Structure formats: C-alpha cells, structure tokens
C-alpha cells in the first residue's frame, strides 16, 4: 500500500474513532444542543418543514437547512444524542476530505501532504470541540469549504471551459446551501476570499466573469424556501436580516459583544496543538532559500488562495461587534492546508530547528499539565492534604493523566524522528487519545451546569400529559425535548423566544413568578417547575411548598413538583 493510501486510511479511522464512536457518550448540553435538537423534533411532530418553531413559537434566528439535516438524522436513528450530533460529525468529515482534495493540488511530489493536511484539520482543538456538538456551525463550515474549494478548482481550469463552468456551478450550489444554513455569511466569507485572491493574481476581469454564475446558482438554490417562508411568515426576512445580521454584527448592543482584539487573544488556543508549529510553517514559506526561489517561482495560487481565505474572514469577524469562537471555524480548512504545505517545505529542506522548538514547547506544556495532575492527586491521596477537587471521581483524573502521558510520548516521538512526514504524523496523533477521552471524563461540575436532561430523565414518571410545566429560559428547550412538549410556560424571561411570544400573541405563556404561584394554588398536583438552582433560589420565597424537590447540584438545575 502506498504512503498516500496508508495515510488516507488513517484519516478514515481517525474520523470514525474521534467523530462517530463517542457521539452518544455525553448528555445533551444546554442551551445550544437542546435548541438545535428541539426545533427539528417539532418540525417532525408538526409536519411543518417551512417555518421553524421552538416550544410551539415562531423561531426565526436561522434558516431551515440545518434543522432539516438534524431532523433527517432523527428520523433514521431516533430521538437520541447520537442522531442529533451526527450531522455535525459528518460535516467535519466531509470538510476534511475537501481539505485533503485541495491540498493534493499543492503536493507535486510528496503524496503525504494532502492526508496530513486533513489530519491537522481533524485534530485542531476547536474543530473537534465543535464537531461533536449539535450546532449548525459545522454544516456551515462544510458548505463554505465546498464553495471555496470548488471556486479555486474553477480558477485553475481553462477560462470558459466546461470544467470551469462545472466547478463554478458546484460553488454556487454549496453557497446556496450555506445560505439556507446560516444566512448571509454564505456570501460574506466567499467574497472576502475570492475578491482579494483574484486581485492578487491580477485577474481583474474574472472578478465579474467568474462570479455571476455561482451567484445565480446560489440564488436559485435558496429561492424556493425563501419564497415559501416569505409567503408563510412575511416578517421572517425583516427579523432575520436586521436582528440576526445587522444588529448581531454591527450594532452597539450586539449579542456576544467583544472588542476587536478578542479573537487575537482567545483564538490561538483553539488551534492547539498546531499553534506551536506555526513559526515552523511560516519559516517554510519565508526562509531565505524560499525567498530566493520565489523570485523565479512565485508563490503558488493555492497558497495565496488559502492565505486570503484565512486572513480576510478572520479580520471580518474581528471587526464585527458580536463574536463567538465558533464564528472562526471556516478559517480552519485553509489553516490546515497552509500548515501542511509549510511544514513539509521546511522539513524537506532539512531545517528541523523551528519544528523541534515547537514540538519541545508542546511537550513541555502538556508535560507540565501532566506533572500538575500527578502532584495534585499525590497531595490528596497519599499525603492527606484536604484540597477541594473540582471533580471527585479519581478515575477521570487518571484517564486525563493517561491521555496527557501518551500525548507527551508522541511529541517526543515527533522530536526524535528524522523523517519529515513521520514527524508531522507523530505530532498530529499526539492529542488523539486525550480528545477521545474528553467525551467520557468531563468534570461533574460541567455536567451539573450544562446537562439538565439527566435530572429530567430521573423524574420522567412525575410528568404526565396533564402536567403544567413551568421553566426558565435556559431549560425550556431541554424540557420540550425530553418531555415531547411544545406548550411550556416560561417564568420571568423568555430570552430568545421573546420574538415568538410577541408575534404569536402568546403573552400568556410568559408569567411573573407571582402569577405562577397563583396557578399552582389553582391546580394542585399538576404543576412542575424546571429551572436553574440560581433562579429557583430567587423565586422560592414566592412559591408554595413543593411536594417533591430534586436538584442536579448547587450549580445545576431543580425539578420541583407541587
């Protein structure tokens, strides 16, 4: 078997082990996972595949395609954690194959460059952390990657050829699907990549010649549902454009508002462990020998395209007022390709020093974490120090230590190896065990504060079809999902459901705590309250004495029956 096939098989095994096998291991988290699971469940239950609803109320924060993907998975695999997360995992896997295919174009002689680019993508911290969650960012990243990879392949074809038109059509299809997933970002990211790339290549006429066809195809793909939702819900586009785009990214009161430099400080850890090798990859592109060769052989279009793809969207998200770390997920495919090309360049020239320094830095950091865990456990178990552990199950600490130990061993293997591809391979495989174990060793405090479904499951028999359920804004999606209800009454605040309450004329489904107390007195034995412990502590002085009270911990949630 050739090296390319061996590494390609490794990529497949990595996808299966990291992204498919552990999908059902962890309970559903709030609010994101429960939200993106509940909207598709209500679509299936109601048969309304055009207008998204949450808790029976209009929910217009996103278009419909992501919900369709999750709903399709639920219909095949059932209402479970594996099903709701599978579209995210498959999106990451398909994106990895786009990375592999695009990197293959820059691998003139070394057949390991492409699969190792996919390895870099799959083992980057944010890609893995988001890729095993039920969110829409992975699907968006896949469609944006398809849009840009297809356009790049079109740019390498003969102008006006059938091949060019074919790839431009694929680019438009993916762009339209991206729009149906998360809206107008589907156009922003490609424009921010394609325009600087064509300008850098002095292909000024192509800015117009090559963009009209994918734009037309994208509009045709998005048009049917866009018209249907307008006919069904005339207010959708006004809310979706102004509230979910203009206000979120530009307004002074933007959601998740952060300063300009937020991503520059918070994003680097998301590229672990590869952030340690960025100086080595940069050396591969800008070393003195590379600079001398560049005079005769200019930087390849692939490198220029990936550079534009990474830098300009990153700056765009930095300029925007609203920021979440998941926004920069589309920057990871070009990062992986650039890293693979740069590392192979520097290592194949025998310039190991920068790679060795980065590997040593990674080994020292994770070795220090391992030493800290060992010292921590030794102090509590063998020397009798009474130290409050944020996680009281010793086996989780031991599993984390094992993952870190293996990680350090692989870094040492990368440091000692003399073959360029093996050095990158060892480095890339280093975090695999720890990433896999992360699904099983999450601290109890995290599960307590993010997974109310465990509490809801414990009291399944205490809720009937006749029960009146009250909930705070953080737990309403989880309560809807687990009890298969879309008529839950919210207490004090509706959060993201404010718009649905106002436009569905359902103000009676948002009550003050005093009104809830009155209803409980009128309906004894039927009322259930599900809320965070913090909210319940604030409300309980206004509420009657419960007949049943249970919680998931001091930082978690309460289940109260009256």
Image (cartoon, helix red, strand yellow):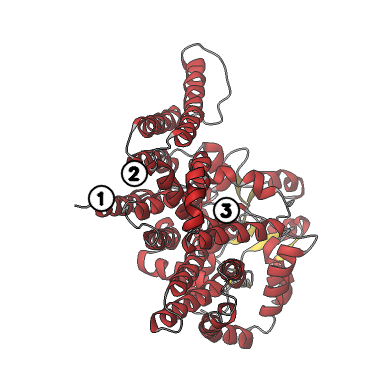
> Mark 3–mark 2 contact, CB under 8 Å?
no
| Distance from Cα at disc 1 to Cα at disc 2 | 10 Å
- Residue shown at 44% from the left, 32% from the top: 400
Circle nearer the N terminus (3, 2):
3
Instruction: Please tell me in which quadrant of the rendered image residue 4 appears.
Output: bottom left
Task: Classify residue 222 as left or right of residue 497.
Answer: left
Q: Residue at x 56, y 30 (%)?
A: 390
From the image, state whether disc 3 or disc 2 is nearer to you: 2
Q: Is residue 507 left or right of residue 349?
A: right
Task: Determine the CA span between mark 1 and mark 3.
Answer: 43 Å
Image quarter for residue 318?
bottom right
Q: Position of residue 139 (x, y in %)?
A: 49, 65
Which residue bears the numbered disc 3? Answer: 30
Q: Is residue 204 above or below residue 5?
A: below
Residue 397, percent from left and from top: 45, 29
- Of discs 1 and 3, which sits in the foreground? 1
On the image, the x and y values in percent for residue 233 come to 64, 83
Q: Earlier in the sequence, mark 1 or mark 2?
A: 1
Element on which disc 2 rests: helix
- Outermost residue on the top side: it is 383
**506, 383: nearer the viewer:** 383
Q: Is residue 458 visible?
A: no
Q: Is residue 57 above or below residue 130?
A: below
Q: Secondary structure at mark 3?
A: loop
Residue, disc 1 = 3
484 or 172: which is nearer to us? 172
Question: Do the residues under discs 1 and 2 have CB atoms within 8 angstroms?
Answer: yes
Point out the tag, 1 or 3, that comes first from the N-terminus. Answer: 1
**Would you name the residue on which mark 2 appears?**
421
Position in image of residue 342 (x %, y %)? 46, 48
């Amino acid at each position: 078997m050739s090296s390319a096939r061996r590494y390609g098989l490794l990529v497949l095994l990595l996808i299966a082990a990291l992204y498919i096998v552990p999908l059902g291991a962890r309970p559903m988290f709030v609010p994101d996972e429960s939200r993106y699971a509940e909207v598709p469940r209500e679509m299936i239950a109601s048969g309304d595949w055009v207008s998204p609803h949450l808790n029976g109320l209009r929910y217009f924060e996103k278009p419909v395609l992501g919900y369709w993907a999750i709903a399709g998975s639920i219909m095949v695999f059932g209402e479970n954690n594996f099903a709701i997360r599978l579209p995210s995992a498959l999106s990451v896997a398909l994106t990895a194959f786009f990375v592999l295919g695009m990197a293959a174009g820059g691998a003139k002689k070394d057949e390991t460059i492409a699969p190792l680019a996919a390895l870099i993508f799959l083992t980057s911290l944010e890609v893995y952390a988001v890729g095993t969650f039920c969110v829409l960012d992975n699907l968006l990243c896949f469609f944006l990657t398809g849009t840009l990879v297809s356009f790049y392949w079109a740019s390498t074809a003969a102008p006006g050829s059938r091949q060019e038109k074919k790839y431009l059509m694929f680019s438009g299809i993916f762009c339209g699907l991206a729009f149906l997933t998360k809206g107008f970002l589907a156009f922003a990211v490609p424009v921010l990549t394609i325009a600087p790339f064509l300008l850098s290549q002095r292909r000024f006429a192509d800015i117009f010649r090559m963009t009209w066809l994918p734009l037309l195809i994208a509009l045709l793909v998005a048009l049917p549902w866009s018209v249907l939702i307008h006919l069904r819900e005339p207010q959708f586009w006004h809310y979706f454009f102004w509230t979910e785009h203009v206000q979120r990214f530009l307004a002074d009161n933007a959601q998740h508002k952060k300063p300009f430099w937020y991503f520059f400080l918070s994003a680097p850890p998301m590229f672990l462990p590869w952030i340690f090798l960025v100086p080595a990859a940069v050396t591969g592109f800008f070393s003195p020998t590379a600079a001398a060769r560049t005079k005769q052989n200019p930087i390849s279009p692939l490198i220029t395209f990936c550079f534009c793809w990474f830098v300009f969207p990153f700056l765009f998200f930095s300029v925007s007022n609203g920021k979440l770390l998941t926004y920069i997920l589309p920057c990871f495919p070009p990062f992986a390709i650039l890293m693979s090309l740069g590392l192979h360049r520097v290592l194949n020239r025998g310039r190991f020093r920068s790679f060795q320094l980065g590997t040593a830095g990674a080994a020292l950091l994770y070795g220090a974490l391992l030493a800290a865990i060992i010292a921590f456990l030794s102090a509590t178990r063998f020397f009798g120090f009474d130290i409050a552990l944020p996680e009281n199950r010793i086996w989780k600490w031991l599993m984390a230590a094992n993952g870190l130990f293996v990680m350090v061993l692989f870094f040492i293997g990368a440091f000692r190896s003399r073959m360029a591809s093996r050095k990158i391979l060892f480095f890339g495989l280093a975090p695999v065990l720890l990433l896999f174990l992360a699904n099983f060793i999450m601290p109890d405090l995290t599960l307590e504060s993010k997974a109310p479904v465990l509490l809801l499951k414990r009291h399944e028999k205490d809720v009937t079809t006749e029960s009146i359920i009250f909930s705070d804004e953080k737990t309403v999606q989880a309560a809807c999902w687990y009890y298969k209800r879309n008529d839950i009454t919210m207490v004090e605040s509706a959060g993201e459901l404010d718009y649905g309450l106002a436009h569905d004329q359902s103000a009676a489904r948002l009550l003050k705590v005093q009104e809830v107390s009155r209803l409980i007195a009128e309906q004894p034995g039927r009322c259930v309250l599900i809320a965070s412990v913090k909210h319940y502590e604030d409300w309980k002085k206004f509420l009657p004495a419960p007949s049943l009270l249970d919680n998931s911990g001091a930082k978690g949630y309460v289940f109260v029956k009256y």
